Amino acid sequence: MFTALITGGTSGIGAAFATALASRGLDLVLVARDTARMEQFAHELHDRYRVNVETITADLADRDDVDRVAARLEDADHRVDLLINNAGFSVKGPIAGPDHDLQDAGFDVMCRAVLVLSSAAARTMAARGEGWILNVSSVAGAVSMGPYSAIKAWTTTFTESLAVELKGTGVKVTALLPGWVRTEFHARAGISGSSIPNWLWLRADKLVEEALEDLIRGKVISVPTLRYKVLMGLVKVAPRPIIHTASGLLNGARAREKKA
């Protein structure tokens, strides 16, 4: 019986991963801040799929909480076979603004926690010669749309570096780069998504199925759906000044959407 630990596992992409893995018979360790919501979701998964679901209440912006989750990953008596670093949120606002609290929290949750938890999982998995690590990044990391793009660019590069380091150990490492996914992520950020064409929106369950296939195949970079593969291919070959201009236009559209 395999066990997967998922951060941010009670909503959006994290919940879709939890459901997909439970349906395959994997036991779960869910990590989230909202204890009541997490416990309810855990009971639903257990009742529906008859798998064991452990819960850990943790705020990944808190270093002590991150250390507790890392210790669970290193617990040799209760092995974790798959780590999914999914916890995250939108980090918006001007880089040159005077208030950096949100950026600090973003770095803690989506950079430092990913580093610490991936490191703990990598050591433990490499020692036994098997394991999987999937870090949820974003196609936003390939453009230039403020702090969130910068954070996700780090996540992608970090994951690639970890994959290189762990080559030959039996541990597979994947960075998942989703596009626009219909979850509560954008609503929490105050973004309705009305300026985004319908064809760019993805379903979380479909995204997760493709990501799991890529993880099993050992792909280091997973960009689900043909439409986003094509878009990412264009971004790679486009001159950076064009990417900068397009990023500015997208930022302007998002700002107008929020005002509306």
Image (cartoon, helix red, strand yellow):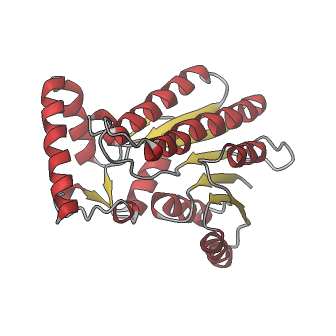
Q: Which residue is drawn at 29% across and 41% down?
A: 94
The answer to which image quadrant residue 240 occupies is: top left
Could you say where residue 138 lies in the image, as x and y percent from the top left? 37, 43
Q: Which of 133 and 189 is in front in this view?
A: 189
Q: Judge from the rendering whether residue 204 lies leftward or rightward of residue 255; answer left or right.
A: right
Q: Residue at x 62, y 77 (%)?
A: 44
Q: Which residue lies furthest to the right in this view?
A: 77
Could you say where residue 7 lies in the image, as x and y percent from the top left? 59, 53
Q: Nearer the viewer, residue 150 or 170?
A: 150
Q: Judge from the rendering whether residue 18 lies leftward or rightward of residue 190; answer left or right.
A: right
Q: Residue at x 16, y 66 (%)?
A: 260
Q: Is residue 36 visible?
A: yes
Q: Which of 97 and 74 is in front in this view?
A: 97
Q: Which of 93 and 147 is in front in this view?
A: 93
Q: Which residue is drawn at 39% across and 63% down?
A: 188
Q: Can residue 130 be seen in this view?
A: no
Could you say where residue 248 lies in the image, as x and y percent from the top left? 16, 39
The quadrant the N terminus occupies is: bottom right
Q: Judge from the rendering whether residue 11 lies leftward or rightward of residue 200; answer left or right.
A: right
From this view, report whether residue 16 is shown above or below residue 175. Answer: below
The answer to which image quadrant residue 19 occupies is: bottom right
